[in-house]
Image (cartoon, rainbow, N blue to C red):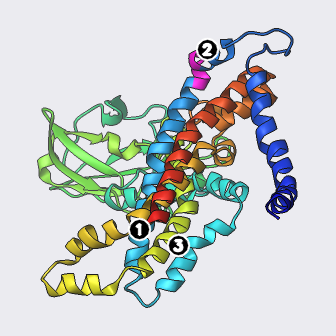
Amino acid sequence: MTRTRKVVAALFLLPALVLLGALVLYPIGYSLVRSLFDQAGDSFTGLDSYQEVFTEDATRTALKNTAIWVVVAPAVATTLGLIFAVLTERVRWGTAFKLVVFMPMAISMLASGIIFRLVYEQDPERGVANAVLVGVHDTFAESSAFPKAHPGRESPLAEEGGGFVTRDPVRVGEPVALPLVGVAPDKMPGSARPAAAAETDPGKVTGTTWQDFTRGKGVGTLGGIDAEELGYPGMRVEAVKDGTVVDSARAGPDGTFTLSGAADGALLRLPESNFREPYRGASWLGPTLVTPAVIGSYLWIWSGFAMVLIAAGLASVPRELLEAARVDGASEWQVFSRITVPVLTPVLAVVLVTLMINVMKIFDLVFIIAPGSSRDDANVLALELYDQAFSKGRPDIASAIAILLLLLVIPVMIFNMRRLRREAKR
């Protein structure tokens, strides 16, 4: 009977063992053998492929980025999941919030990558991330509407330190003309109105700053205000004496401005702030920020996974412990840090280890989000394996990277198995 049971058990296990051997053991063995031969697979080269893996700049960058992923992404995702799980337990709409946070898990990594490629677009009119940054920036620091403006021919203005200054001092009672060109008509602010000649004031310095350009060849008076020409609303004008600003004003919608009598005999300056390029946000997909940007997209997807697992563990925490601590005078932070987190440690370990194994194999998000110009800076081991195998035609290097990935994953898996066994004994 015992022998028969063993035979029956072996027969039932045989299909699974065949699949395990064909899909796991054979690829591992073949990759190990292939990594010991040259590119063509004819000559035995020993560990040369592994040596090349650790000496090539691309592979070393991939190793560095993979280490960043393993250290940062699982820890942040687990922390966010813990925060979401604890906070949503106390609100009525917690279930709806959990549904929204978990929803990205239903989207494929390909679709998520495409979404975040659009989110990180440099143009604030297309990229959500830069639209938010530009909106916040412009709330506290107004952007210039005239970055391309400059003096035209026979202008009374001369360039100085990124801005422009009049060549001659101004006098009270004598209107000043400050014509500029260089702003396309469709780029003028919506508040701009037809330019008007400044009124004469015997005790003040008045003037007009405007777009000295009229459409049509030969149309318009150089240095004179024409009917179709627009003023520069909001243009800052400073009166400078001996390097000191004695007065300043902003031009109105028609470009006119008024300075006090203190500006008499001063030079008028249009400071650099009038012509500063508008803030366009961060270069999310540039060499510096591309890896944090891709990690951000990963957190958007996997924080919901961490939250659901941690919330399930939190539901099993004995409420008597929490209430007893509160009765004894513990603050909410003390309850959280000294009771909730220690009790949830096994769940947090499961989530953390699972995400660590997951990020070691990260490929599709980096492949889709990182543009070609910064692909090398965002490179990870799984992507480098793909490039070596299919783009560069180096199966030997690709096999060595595959074995390296296996060696990196095995310690984490062993740790997870031992932890599960300890939990089972309890």
Is residue 322 depicted above or below 198 in this figure? below
Amino acid type of the residue tagged 3 in the rendering:
Val
Name the N-terminal-most of marks 2 and 1: 2
Q: Is residue 58 magenta?
A: yes
Question: Residue 337, percent across and down?
Answer: 26, 67
Q: Nearer the viewer, residue 140 or 303?
A: 303
- Examine the rendering and report whether any part of residue 197 can be seen: no
Amino acid type of the residue tagged 1 in the rendering:
Leu
Secondary structure at numbered mark 1: helix
Please report the bounds of the magenta region as a residue range: 54-59
Q: Residue at x 63, y 45 (%)?
A: 362
Work out how far the residue at label 2 is from the one at label 3, CA to CA, in angstroms. Answer: 43 Å
Q: Which residue is mark 2?
A: 51
Quick check: marks 2 and 1 in contact, CB under 8 Å? no
Q: Is 262 left or right of 236, judged from the image as shown? A: left
**Crowding at label 2, few (<14), some or many (≥20) Cα neighbours within 10 Å?**
few
The overriding secondary structure of the stretch rendered in magenta is helix
